[in-house]
Amino acid sequence: DAKTTQPPSMDCAEGRAANLPCNHSTISGNEYVYWYRQIHSQGPQYIIHGLKNNETNEMASLIITEDRKSSTLILPHATLRDTAVYYCIVIPGGSNYKLTFGKGTLLTVNP
Amino acid sequence: EADIYQTPRYLVIGTGKKITLECSQTMGHDKMYWYQQDPGMELHLIHYSYGVNSTEKGDLSSESTVSRIRTEHFPLTLESARPSHTSQYLCASRINLHNEQFFGPGTRLTVL
């Protein structure tokens, strides 16, 4: 499975866009990029996923580079409630995958 | 809102006791998972199941055991609790590949 690299922490001002990077340079063609977040020891929450096209939903946007070796999760207008650990996870094709979490990025949204 | 439940939410128990952490989901998901997380640390997968009568050990070795007799129910048991088992235990479920994985609220276990 492709491994991911994320910065350990980031800060963002409330109301501004938060751009969280993820490097997955060894990703293979059938592997998807998923993002989850965990707010203060609650269960992780799904945010978004994509294969090669950019994706957007009500929570965030996911930008995947053309070579698929990196991606960026964008929270367009960060709020204090977005303070959390954000996990970038690469998942292979096939239904029986195991979702495993690394250290993620602690995003702190400041007032 | 995800329909996945864990009981108890908090448990303080003495060393040597047998405990069962309950996890139930009403979404009909085949795939269920148990994770363990110490405060401020990473989530570690300890058990998973792809359906009834199917259970596998996860990436982190655990002295706990699980069973999957019904689709909606995935209990985790510790035969003899020890202080090293003190942690938060999170249960999750998913229906298939590209659906989100839902997590329960967790059980915070303290073994004295």
Image (tube, rainbow, N blue to C red):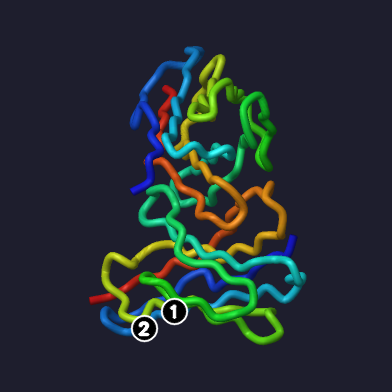
Residue lying at 37% horizontally and 56% vertically, measured from the top left = A39
Q: Quadrant of the C terminus of chain B?
A: top left
Three-letter amino acid code of the residue under disc 2: Ala
Where residue B80 sits in the image (x, y, percent)?
55, 15
Horizontal side of residue A38 vs A29, given as left or right: left
Q: Where is A48 relative to A55, above or below?
A: above
**Left or right, residue A109 beside residue B76:** left
User: Looking at the image, do the residues carrying marks 2 and 1 touch, with CB atoms under 8 Å apart?
Assistant: yes
**Distance in Å between CA atoms under marks 2 and 1:** 7 Å
Residue at image point 34% right, 30% down: B10
Query: Which is more toward the observer, B58 or B15?
Result: B58
Mark 2 crowdedness (10 Å alpha carbons): few <14, some 14-19, many ≥20:
some
Q: Residue furthest front?
A: B28
Is residue A26 toward the left or the right of residue B74 in the image?
Answer: right
Front-most of residues A29 and A17: A29
Q: Amino acid at mark 1?
A: Ile
Residue at image position (49%, 29%) is B72
Instruction: Give me the chain letter of mark 1.
Output: A
Q: Is residue A38 above or below residue B7?
A: below
Q: Which residue is mark 2?
A: A17
Q: Pinpoint residue B61: horizontal percent, then vertical percent.
A: 67, 35
Q: Can you give x and y, in whole percent of width and height, for residue A38 in the image? A: 42, 56
**Local SS, label 1:** strand
Secondary structure of the residue carrying tag 2 is loop
Work out whether residue A103 or residue B72 is closer to the camera in this orientation and state it.
Answer: B72
**Residue A60, quarter of the rendered image:** bottom left
**Label 1 sits on residue:** A74
